[in-house]
Amino acid sequence: MQLTLNLFCVVFVAAISYLVVVIPKVMKPLFLVAFILVFASCAMMQSIVKSTFPYTTTVTIPKTDKPGEEHSATAMATSFDQDFRKDGNNGAKVSEVRMVSAKLESRDPSDFNIGNLSMVKVYMAKADGTDEVLVASRTDITAGVGNTMVLDIDNSSFLDQHVRQAQVKIRMVYKLRNAIQVSPSLHIILGLSAYPNR
C-alpha cells in the first residue's frame, strides 16, 4: 500500500509539472492549486499509513487445562513493519500510541472453534513484564463463533513506552467452556495507531 501510494504521488507530480510547462498561462494557476492540494494529500495519507501498525503473536492453549478455571498463556510480540525503539529511526516521531483493533484467529489447527473459550482478556506489557495493561477482551463468546473472532479493545492507556522496545510481552487470560482434545495455537493480532510528532 505504501509503495503504491508513493508511486501514485510521484507520477502525479511529474504529470502536473509537465502540464505547467505546456499549458497556456491562463490555466497555470488552476493546475498549480491542484498540484499543491494533491501533494498535501499524499503527505497526509503517507503519515496516516505509517502511523498504523500491527503487533502479532501466537499463544498455545494446553489441552490439559480444565474448563471453567482461569488460565493464562504468554508470548512475545513484535511489529513486522515498524521499529519505535528510542535508538531506532522512529522513536521520537510518534506519540499517543493506542489500541485500535484486536482479533483472535485459530492457527493450528486452523479450524479450531474459538467458541471452546468462554472468555478472553489480552494484556500488553514491556518485555520484562512490567507496566502490564489490558488492551482487549471478550467476555460474551458464543459457542459457535468459529475460527476467528474480533475482540473488544481497551484504548484507555497510552502504549508509547511499550512499543518503543524491541518487543512486548502479551498475556492472554482465558477460560475454557469445554474440555478440548488438542492444544490449539491461537494467533493474536493487535492493531495500534499513533500520531506523528510535529
Image (cartoon, rainbow, N blue to C red):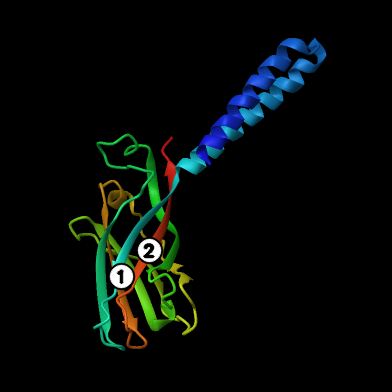
Residue 175 lies, with reference to residue 111, above or below; the image says below
| Amino acid at pointer 1 | Met
Tell me: 55 left or right of 50.
left
Q: Which mark is residue 10?
A: none
Tell me: 100 left or right of 92.
right
Question: Which is nearer the N-term, disc 1 or disc 2?
Answer: 1
Which residue is pictured at 55% across the width and 39% down the height?
A: 45
Separation of marks 1 and 2 at Cα, in angstroms: 9 Å
Residue to which mark 2 is pinned:
188
The location of residue 125, given as percent across then percent down, is 26, 60
Residue 55 lies, with reference to residue 117, above or below; the image says above
- Contact between marks 1 and 2 (CB within 8 A): the answer is yes
Quarter of the image with the C terminus is: top left
Q: Quadrant of residue 13?
A: top right
Residue to which mark 1 is pinned:
172
Label 1: how many Cα within 10 Å (few below 14, some 14–19, many 20+): many
Camera-side mark, 1 or 2? 2
Tell me: 90 left or right of 147.
left
Which residue is pictured at 66% across the width and 16% down the height?
A: 17
